[in-house]
Every structure is written in C-alpha cells, then in structure tokens.
C-alpha cells in the first residue's frame, strides 16, 4: 500500500462544493463580531468611549481592555530566551498600541453589518508616539523603545559558533561577502482566518470553538485558563481549511477575544476576517537582512562562514516569532561541509505587524544568501556553479552529520541522506550540459538565458509526539482520528495508505476525520512538514495494536490460544473458523490509541534548478523550466509527493518574484489589498518537473521524511542565480527578494552606470 500513487481520498466534498469552512458554520442564535484596530503604528491609548456603539440597535456587546483579563497574553509556543516575556502580545492593546492593526476593541452584534457600523461609533483618544519601521532604525542610538521596561528593541541576541570562523576567513584563499535582504511577506491563503465560539450555556456544558487552526490541542491548553474553564471543558474542532502555510496555526488575539465575547453574551459568536485584515493583522514573515561572508580554499571548498542577521519581528513576540530566523541561522550551512561557522542573530521589535511562521520559516532567507555567494565564488574561482556545489556537498558516508548549530536547544544533525546523488539526479533531469549548450546558442542570437541552481536542507517531522486513534466499525470500515491537522496536502490519503498497509486492507476503507479534541485527547498538530512523519508512524503503531487486540478477542471468542490465531486482510482465523474485524466490533467496541514520540528532527536534502530568459532592457524575467527534487525517505504516495513539490514551487515563485509587504515611515501598510500585494497566477508558472529520492530516514520506524516545505525555499536563490547568470557579462548581482522587473532593471543600471561598472 505504501508507495502506490493512489488518487486522493476525502476530496469529494471539496470538489463538489460541499466543503464546510468557518464561513459556512451556522449555529442557532449566532452573533457576528468585528474588530476595531489601531490606525496608528505607535500610540498611547488615552481613553475609549463605547457608549454610542452600545446604544445602536442590534449591538450586543463591546469588549475593550477593561473586559479582558490581564493574564490573556499570547505565550511562546516554543522555548525562548530569558527576558522574552516582556515582549509578548496581550489579547487587546493595553495602554499602548504598537502596530497599525492591533485590536483595540471588539464589537458583537446581530449581524456583521451592524458590527462594522458600530466600530465607527467607538471614540478612541490616541496620543501618537514615534514609530520605528526597520530593524536598523530600531537599533539606532536614541531610537524610541517599544517597551519602556526593556533596555533595547533587541529581544534576543542568539549566537552560534562552530570552530574558529575568524581564523578560517583570514586563512581563506577567497572571501566573498554581501548584504542580502528578504522582503516581508505573508501567506495570503484563499480562506482568511475565522472562528466560531459557542459558550457552555449553549452547548450544554462545554465551550466549543470551531475553526481552522492546525494546533487544536496546543491552543486548547493555552486558552482554557484564559477563559476560566478546565481544558476538558474546552472543545476545539477543525473544519475544512482553505490553506495553512504556517500562518494558520498560530494563536492570535481574536482566538481569545471571540470566545470571551461568547461567554459575555451567552450566545455563539462568529468572526471571519476581511482580506484587508488578513494582510494587516495575520502573521507576517521573512523580513530579514543577512550580512554574510564565506571563505573558500583555492579549489572551491568552503573553509569558513560568518554572518550577522537582523530579523525584523514586528511589534511583539507572538507565539513563534523567534523561530524562523533561528531556523535559518541553524541551517545556513546547508548541505555543505562548513568547518568554521559564526552567527550573530538579532531579533528586533519594530512598529509593524508581528511575524511568525510561513511555509519553510527561515529557509528561503538563508538559502538565498548562501546560494548566491556560492555562484559568486564559482565565478571568481573560474568554476562551474555545479562543480563548486559538487566539491562541497556532504556525502552519504558522512551521515549522521552534526552541523554544530543548534535551534531551540536541538542540535542540527542530519541522520541520513545522499546529497551528491540527489544533485546528480537534479542535473540529469535538467539536462544540464545540454541546457548550457542551448544557452550558448541562444546567446549568439541575442537571447539572454540563465541557469540557476540551489541545494538546501529542510527541517521536517518536528516533535515532540503525535497521536492516532483507529476504530473498527461493524460495517467493515474504520474511523481514524489524529492530533495532526489536514491543511490540504492529502494527509487523509497518506494515513489511509499507511493503515491499509498495516492491516492489509484497501485504503478506501478508512475514514480519516478532521481533528477534534473530543475524539483525540492529545496531539500536537500540523506544521514543519511533520504530519505524515509523526501521525503516519502513530497510525502504523495503531494498526499493529489493533491486530493484537483483535487476536486476543478472537482467541476468546473461538476458544483457542492467542498464538493459534492468524490474521490476514481483516480476518482472524483458527481451526477453520474465522471472524472479521467488523464482526468483533459488533460484539464490542474495537478501538486503539497510539502515540509516536519523536526523538529527533528529520532532515531532508533538496535541490532546485531554474532556466529563465531575461530582458536586460525591461528587467522582465520569464521562467522557462523548473526542476525540483527532495529526499522523502520513503514515498507513501508518489503522486502526492510530486503534487506537494509542484505546489511548493508555485508558492516559492510568488515569494521570489512577486510578494512584498511594504510600510511607509509612519508604519502604515502600503500593500493592504491584493491589488498591491501581488500574488502569482497561472501565467507565471513554467513547466515544472518534480522528482524524489528515497533514502530511508533513521529517525522513525517507517523511514519517512516530510515534503510539505521542500518545494519552495530554494526558488528565490535559484531564480536569482539564473537572472545573474543571464546578465553575467554586465556584472549584475541581486541582493533582494522579491526579484521584480523593476529590481532587475535597477540592478542592470547599477552595474552598467555605477562607479563599479565594467569599462566598455
């Protein structure tokens, strides 16, 4: 069953328009909520007058800071350095608003229309304060401090040291360096965030939150004490999800305010954000600057690497704000042998929307910086870009390999893999030598074609555990519940195939449900390409436990020793007599639970190659072909693996060539609609060739690696390398993502007319 390219299971409802998203949830007596957000990036809140809003017909309640417990603060979801608590975000602005879009009040009314109208009746007196809108400005001498109790706008300085980078750079034959900047971006999923909260007085004893979060058990444990209910009396249920991409799983102020409002009016309350709210208030990501130096031996081998990273994390440390940049710092050495490495990572608060995770957090940023300098070094040393990578890739014999870096207390250890074999496959699929020959032929005709490469490593299968519950039903089918969430990549199919393999039954006999804390007592959720690795191994364990329990019951029913019972394809037999799992379920409930504990992170080697044509006169970049590959350990469903890689490429093209959240000096978002925040379309997609390698992981019994984040994080680097390759005779270099026609044209003008331009 594992390894078969089965058609995705459980998609019929979505294909036929019968999906159930938060916007589709209707409960009797349900009210609607709207959020009043600060128009200022930084301001003291002098007073709030809600009387006119409350007097409006249809308005049921208005919540301000006075109605929200002071303990309602969004905590870190991951371990964080000492002192971070100072920078955590309250559920509603208390005394000071620190970014434009921060919740100041919440209105509940009979309809969304009335609620929106009531927002205009709330009078807030603000005293504007100076805003800082970049990491450099926030760190400058005399910069306004966002938090008066802190000594600096730097939340934490995180350092990593491997060997002696200073000495390694001094002794290097070649040192290349550059400052790279990655723009601020967000997920912009098809479905915006939303939540329905039903209070205990309506449900009959439990608080029920219905939404599209992907970490329901984590959020339940955080929310319960804030709402004043025991965790067992708080139920979270996931409905269909229109895209996760990291942003969906974080805890937000609205996740606290909406249930508090439901408790206040003792009626269900629904909130669904607008697109402008989504771009303004949902997590931002990626904005970071790398000052990177790499030292090379004369033969092209890396000797040392040193980097200073400034991460702009926005106004607060919200849920996992420090995670992306630290992941990037830990994986900056990538799939290469780097004997000496030094990193200083600054996490800086500014008056902008807080950041969090976004598909492959931290890795597009670090890959862009490293892989650009790999190409720069290759040109300086007279090496082909493919050859310099070959000389530095870690070999299969090096595994397990400890990079020496650490992220959140976990050492970066690649358990297994074959990076050179993956790279060889990438070049073969691309037809590298033929592509170079075609490039030369096109160049003779005046067509500027470039070829860009990037190799990188992805962090997958994050712990600490995941659960699965399997129940045999009397009709011969099976119900499967897990703590992992279904964000769209086909988790239902993967778990059904794994269980089908364990039980010897067709995958379509398994009904995998959306997560619900009422069905599974504990779980972690879906992020970090972890669901198939962790929930898949838990499901595999549950399959074995189900067979064991069925053998015990069948032995008792047939009056034989348990050892005499044989099992095959759902049937238990002994002495010519047999029972099916369904028949045993008719006699008594037949269900088992399993939990898979994750001892280590599972890493996946990845690579991408891009062919692009570039117009120097206009800066227009046309992607002609993308080849992307990843080591999946073991492909549960090859079709889903390829689909994930292709989807990742589409996501990565958007990040690399379109998306940028821009602010003015006052901290106002300038790209607050999809007219301004550009997203890729079908016309931007080139031919995409996705492939995978299977080198079993040693971190889990099934040998799996995650693939959900493998397709996108190398695109920016590979596209930048392709563009610079096409314009190499002009000496063009790219230092920023996204790569737009305007930025390419500016780079051409800088290279050809600036003081460093080549003489004609």
Image (cartoon, rainbow, N blue to C red):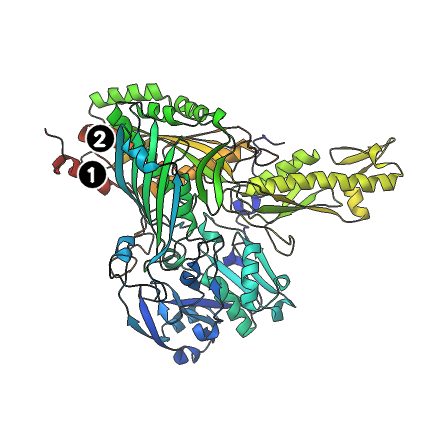
Examine the rendered structure and indicate whether residue 28 appears above or below residue 12: below
Instruction: Describe the element under mark 2 as helix, strand or loop.
Output: loop
Instruction: Describe the element under mark 1 as helix, strand or loop.
Output: helix
Q: On the picture, is 346 further left or further right than 406?
A: left
Determine which residue is flagged by label 2. 727
- For the C terminus, the quadrant is top left
Asked which quadrant contains residue 253, the reply is bottom left
Q: On the picture, is 357 further left or further right than 532?
A: left
- For the N terminus, the quadrant is top right
Q: Which residue is drawn at 44% across and 38% down?
A: 404
Q: How far apart are marks 2 and 1 (CA)?
A: 10 Å
Asked which quadrant contains residue 738, the reply is top left
Q: Which residue is drawn at 56% across and 35% down?
A: 704
Disc 2 + disc 1, Cβ < 8 Å: yes
Report the front residue among 132 and 252: 132
Report the front residue among 206 and 371: 371
Asked which quadrant contains residue 278, the reply is bottom left
Q: Which mark is residue 248?
A: none
State the image coordinates of residue 227 (x, y, percent, origin top left).
55, 68
Q: Kindly tell me whether residue 216 is visible in this rendering.
A: yes
Q: Residue at x 44, y 78 (%)?
A: 54
Q: Residue 747 carries which label?
A: 1
Q: Which of marks 2 and 1 is nearer the N terminus?
A: 2
Q: Which residue lies furthest to the right in this view?
A: 559
Q: Residues within 10 Å of mark 1 (few under 14, many from 20)?
A: many
Q: On the picture, is 490 further left or further right than 366?
A: right
Report the front residue among 166 and 447: 166
State the image coordinates of residue 345 (x, y, percent, origin top left).
36, 47
State the image coordinates of residue 485 (x, y, percent, origin top left).
55, 48
State the image coordinates of residue 563 (x, y, percent, origin top left).
83, 34
Q: Residues within 10 Å of mark 2 (few under 14, many from 20)?
A: many
């Amino acid at each position: 069953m594992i390894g078969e390219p089965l058609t995705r299971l459980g998609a019929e409802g979505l294909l036929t328009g019968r999906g159930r998203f938060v916007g589709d949830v209707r409960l009797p007596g349900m009210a609607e909520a709207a959020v009043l957000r600060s128009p200022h990036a930084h301001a003291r809140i002098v007073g709030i007058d809600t009387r006119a809003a409350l007097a409006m017909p249809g308005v049921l309640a208005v919540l301000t800071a006075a109605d929200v417990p002071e303990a309602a603060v969004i905590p870190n979801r991951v371990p964080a350095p000492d002192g971070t608590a100072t920078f955590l975000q309250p559920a509603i602005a208390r005394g000071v608003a620190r970014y434009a879009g921060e919740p100041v009040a919440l209105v509940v009314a009979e309809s969304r229309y009335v609620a929106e109208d009531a927002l205009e009746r709330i009078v807030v007196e603000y005293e504007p304060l100076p805003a800082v809108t970049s990491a450099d400005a926030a760190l400058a001498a005399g910069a306004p401090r966002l938090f008066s109790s802190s000594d600096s706008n730097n939340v934490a300085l995180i350092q990593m040291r491997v060997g002696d980078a200073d000495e390694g750079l001094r002794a290097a034959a070649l040192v290349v360096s550059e400052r790279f900047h990655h723009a601020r971006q967000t997920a912009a999923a098809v479905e915006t965030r939303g939540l329905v909260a039903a209070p205990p007085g309506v449900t009959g004893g439990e608080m029920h939150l219905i939404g599209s979060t992907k970490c329901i058990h984590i959020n339940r444990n955080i929310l319960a004490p804030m709402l004043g209910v025991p965790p067992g009396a708080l139920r979270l249920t996931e409905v269909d999800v229109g895209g996760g991409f990291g942003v969906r799983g974080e805890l937000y102020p609205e996740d606290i305010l909406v249930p508090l409002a439901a408790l206040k009016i003792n009626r269900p309350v629904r909130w669904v954000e607008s697109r402008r709210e989504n771009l303004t208030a949902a997590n931002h990501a990626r904005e970071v600057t790398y000052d990177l130096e790499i030292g090379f031996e004369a033969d092209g081998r890396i000797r040392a690497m040193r980097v200073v990273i400034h991460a702009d994390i926005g106004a607060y440390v919200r849920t996992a704000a420090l995670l992306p940049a630290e992941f990037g710092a830990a994986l900056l050495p990538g799939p290469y042998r780097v004997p000496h490495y030094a990193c200083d990572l600054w996490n800086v608060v500014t008056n902008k929307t807080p950041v969090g995770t976004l598909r492959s957090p931290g890795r597009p940023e670090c890959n862009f910086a490293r892989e650009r300098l790999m190409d720069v070094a290759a040109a300086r040393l007279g090496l082909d870009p493919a050859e310099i990578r070959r000389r530095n890739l870690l070999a299969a014999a090096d595994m397990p390999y400890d990079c020496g870096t650490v992220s959140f207390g976990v050492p970066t250890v690649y358990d297994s893999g074959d990076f050179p074999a993956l790279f060889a496959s990438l070049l073969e699929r691309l037809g590298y030598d033929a592509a170079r020959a075609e490039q030369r032929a096109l160049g003779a005709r005046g067509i500027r074609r470039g070829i860009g490469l990037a190799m990188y490593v992805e962090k997958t299968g994050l712990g600490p555990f995941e659960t699965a519950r399997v129940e045999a039903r009397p009709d011969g089918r099976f119900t499967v519940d897990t703590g992992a969430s279904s964000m769209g990549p086909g988790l239902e199919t993967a778990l059904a195939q794994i269980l089908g393999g364990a039980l010897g039954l067709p995958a379509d006999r398994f009904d995998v449900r959306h997560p619900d804390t009422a069905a599974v007592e504990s779980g972690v959720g879906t992020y970090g390409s972890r669901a198939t690795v962790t929930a898949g191994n838990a499901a595999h364990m549950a399959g074995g436990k189900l067979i064991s329990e069925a053998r015990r019951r069948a032995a008792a029913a047939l009056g034989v020793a348990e050892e005499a019972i044989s099992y095959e394809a759902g049937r238990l037999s002994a002495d010519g007599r047999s029972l099916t799992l369904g028949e045993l379920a008719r006699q008594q409930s037949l269900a088992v639970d399993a939990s898979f504990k994750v001892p280590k992170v599972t890493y996946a080697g990845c690579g991408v190659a891009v062919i692009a044509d570039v117009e120097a006169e206009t800066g227009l970049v046309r992607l002609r072909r993308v080849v992307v590959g990843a080591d999946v350990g073991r492909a549960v469903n090859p079709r889903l693996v390829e689909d994930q890689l292709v989807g990742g490429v589409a996501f990565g093209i958007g990040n690399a060539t379109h998306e940028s959240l821009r602010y003015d000096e006052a901290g106002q978002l300038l790209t607050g609609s999809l007219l301004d925040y550009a997203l890729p379309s079908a016309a931007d997609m080139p031919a995409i060739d996705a492939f995978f390698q299977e080198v079993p992981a040693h971190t889990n019994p099934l040998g799996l690696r995650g693939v959900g984040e493998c397709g996108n994080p190398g695109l920016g680097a590979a596209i930048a390398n392709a563009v610079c390759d096409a314009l190499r005779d002009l000496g063009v270099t790219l230092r920023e993502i996204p790569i737009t026609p305007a930025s390419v044209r500016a780079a051409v003008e800088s290279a050809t007319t600036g003081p460093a331009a080549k003489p004609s």
